[in-house]
Amino acid sequence: MYVKSETATSLPLYVQISEVLIREIASGQLLDGERLPPERTLAKQHDTTVRTLRKALAILEKNGLIESIQGSGNYVRKTPDVASVYSMFRLELLRGGGLPTAKILAVDELKKPDDLPQFGQSERGTRIKRLRFLNHEPIAVEEIWLDSCAGEIVPADLSDSLYRYYKMRLGFWITHAEDYVSIGQVPDWAPTEFTPKPGEAVGFIERISHTEQHGSVEFSRTWFDPQRARYVQRLR
């Protein structure tokens, strides 16, 4: 069972539960046509109330991912390309799914170093370093650069989903991204909670993210533990 948290900057509890279920459906842990457990059972599994669970299920039903049949229950109806908070987060646990959360390690406004690719309009950017989790398992470290022209980041207001923060606080939405997946070495700033040690070879993702308003606005590097997680891109 995944034990959830709810703080001032985290997603609402019902949204967390909906994201867990969406990712389980996407990964095939919940199959098309499968009947979900009764609501009271499902609420107990997620350590919440039936009322909160129903709010989560309403999100899935709105997106066509489940069908509620009176007197029978809720059934999975797998629908491609459902937009969700973490629909562009490509890392999953080896067993599939997992709710992404993050621990902020550092936030700095800096001149962009020479080793970054060309993106954005400014010579400066905000660098965010994070430790990423799936169901509380540390699976990756990230270095994200947001172009200064896109807006000012307030560290205390950051949430687990940066893309949601961009939309809610900075007024833009990431519409698409390019990922380059290879092998990289864990950076020397990685915390001890991340099992692979600095210099060790791990999975490596470089991403350039785009918006309608600003064009290429963000560049990120992600080093992930292949013993715990994998990169997944589903083709429709």
Image (cartoon, rainbow, N blue to C red):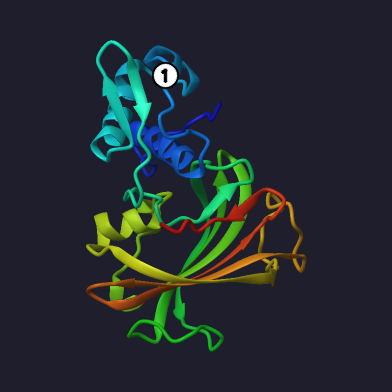
Q: Quadrant of residue 49?
A: top left
The residue drawn where x is 45% and y is 37% is 20
Work out which quarter of the rendered image holds the C terminus and state it: bottom left
The amino acid type of the residue labelled 1 equals Ala
In the shown orientation, is residue 229 left or right of residue 155?
Answer: right
In the shown orientation, is residue 194 left or right of residue 148?
Answer: right
Q: Residues within 10 Å of mark 1 (few under 14, many from 20)?
A: some
User: From what the image shows, is residue 37 above or below residue 115?
Assistant: above
Q: Nearer the viewer, residue 222 or 40?
A: 40
Q: Nearer the viewer, residue 47 or 190?
A: 47
The residue drawn where x is 41% and y is 40% is 22
User: From what the image shows, is residue 90 above or below residue 215?
Assistant: above
Task: Read off the residue under disc 1.
Answer: 43
Work out which quarter of the rendered image holds the N terminus and state it: top right
Q: Quadrant of residue 59?
A: top left
Residue 46 locus on image (x, y percent): 46, 24
Q: Nearer the viewer, residue 32 or 216?
A: 32
Could you say whether the residue bearing mark 1 is in a helix, strand or loop?
helix
Residue 116 visible in the current orientation: yes
Residue 147 visible in the current orientation: no
Residue 185 locus on image (x, y percent): 71, 70
User: From what the image shows, is residue 188 above or below residue 231?
Assistant: below
The residue drawn where x is 46% and y is 78% is 110
User: From what the image shows, is residue 234 above or below residue 204?
Assistant: above
